[in-house]
Image (cartoon, rainbow, N blue to C red):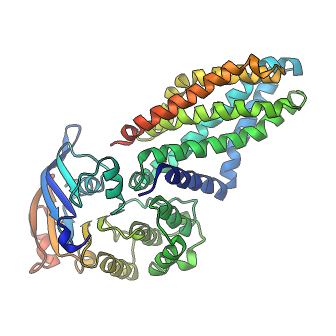
Amino acid sequence: MTAGDGPLLEVRSVSRRFGVVAALDRIDLTLQPGERVLLLGRNGAGKTTLLRLAATLLRPTTGTLRHFGREARGDEGAAVRGRLGYLPHGSLLYDDLSVAGNLRFHAALHGLADVRGRVQRALEETGLSGRAGDPAGTLSRGLQQRLSAARAFLHRPDLLLLDEPFTGLDAPGVLLLQGLLRERLGTAGACLLATHDIPSSWPLVTRVVALAAGRIVLDRKADGLAPADLQALPGAAS
Amino acid sequence: MIGVARGSLAVAAKDLRAEMASPAQAMSLFVFALLVVVVFHFAFDLTAAEFTALGPGVLWVAILFTGILALDRGFRVEREGGRIDGLRLAPMPRSALYFGKVLSTWTIMTAVEIVLVPIAAILFNHPLGGWALRLLPVLLLNTLGFAAVGCLFACITTQTRRGDLLLPVLLFPAAVPIALAAVRATGHVLAGRPLDRFAHWLTLSAAYDLIFLAAAVLLFDHALDD
């Protein structure tokens, strides 16, 4: 995928209901290559639902989603999933597998070549080389978050979907994740990042989208905004 | 994107590695199966002759109960913390996840059975002999059937709030044909009868295996849907 290939994600009039609760209501959103979108909203605003829809883990009740210009169904779905990097609030790690074993399993699921080299690089980038053989369940919350990020980025996805990626990270961990995100996204990748930690994500983002009660109430470039401005926007503040 | 075979092997290898990484956990299945057999041993005080008649039932009750534990554990680890999302996001046909789980459950259950059967025979004073080898296809075919139907139901129930309670309620009625075929075929093997006397039970087991494996390919995508 290059910058000229069109949107990486197109969300068209998407609604998602859970029983009688409307988590999202006629959302429209397009992510172009290079865009790093900060997704804001209070608890229950629909951020995680939108991320799960974008990750193909949920289906919309109405509306359509297209990834990389196609709908994620059947074989197309598998091809789309291979280009997504999803870092959810939970770690998705297996406690009984080693740190390196978790990455090797992810590499196997994605059919990656040079697994050993990739895993070694990922461990070095996240500062986990010294813990490679330890069971993932023995890591602290912050180190698990680093490993989760390494897992999500291992297959070099084009579209990153991040739900509270800075949770549990100390200051060096935040800097490390920011650096990884910058490097991974380059100019062609895109990122949808939901967080309440605006200061940590602010150096990365190019656009701000705010949700309130399942609807987009703000969608603008980050240029000219400061984190403090966001607190005053309706529905945007955490 | 990877194919069904590679995806299945990756999932199964992961499950088996996790089992090996925690020997106490792996042993607990065998200990449970052995306890069931021991309880029956003390409850019925079976003689060697009676074991031929009642032993197959005792063995398969132990195996199927242990299978439920293995299934619950195998899918609980995916349910907790939403790990199943990581598998659903893999660029492989969803059926690869199913076949991987069937393969790991089948392997784990068979490993338990291979140790359990001789111990049960010794416990009930049943002479060990060539029957043990002839029992192998009975164990393999019926355990595969149980794993095939079990993984399909476990996938469905794992996404519900009390899936651990729901699984046996749904699974045991569906597994009646496999339990029946397994007990009958095992009885013939223990009695030393020739294959042609119980080949029809093996055919039933093989047909059951194929039907559920094929049905799962069609249904598994829907079972994994939100």
Number of marks in the image?
Answer: 0
A55 relative to B187 in the view: left or right: left
A186 relative to B220 in the view: left or right: left
The quadrant of the rendering that contains the C terminus of chain B is top left
Looking at the picture, does residue A122 appear above or below residue B4?
below
Looking at the picture, does residue A201 appear above or below residue A234?
below
The image shows residue B91 at horizontal and vertical percentages of 40, 56
Looking at the picture, does residue B22 appear above or below residue A238?
above
Q: Is residue B86 visible?
A: yes
Residue drawn at (59%, 21%) of the image: B177
The image shows residue B186 at horizontal and vertical percentages of 74, 24
Name the foreground residue: A171 vs B53. B53
B62 relative to A35 in the view: left or right: right
The quadrant of the rendering that contains the N terminus of chain B is bottom left
Which quadrant of the figure has residue B33?
Answer: top right
Residue drawn at (11%, 80%) of the image: A223
Residue drawn at (78%, 34%) of the image: B117
Q: Is residue A34 visible?
A: no
The image shows residue B217 at horizontal and vertical percentages of 44, 38
Pick out the residue farthest to the front. Answer: B196
Residue drawn at (88%, 27%) of the image: B126
The image shows residue B156 at horizontal and vertical percentages of 43, 37
Which quadrant of the figure has residue B53?
Answer: top right
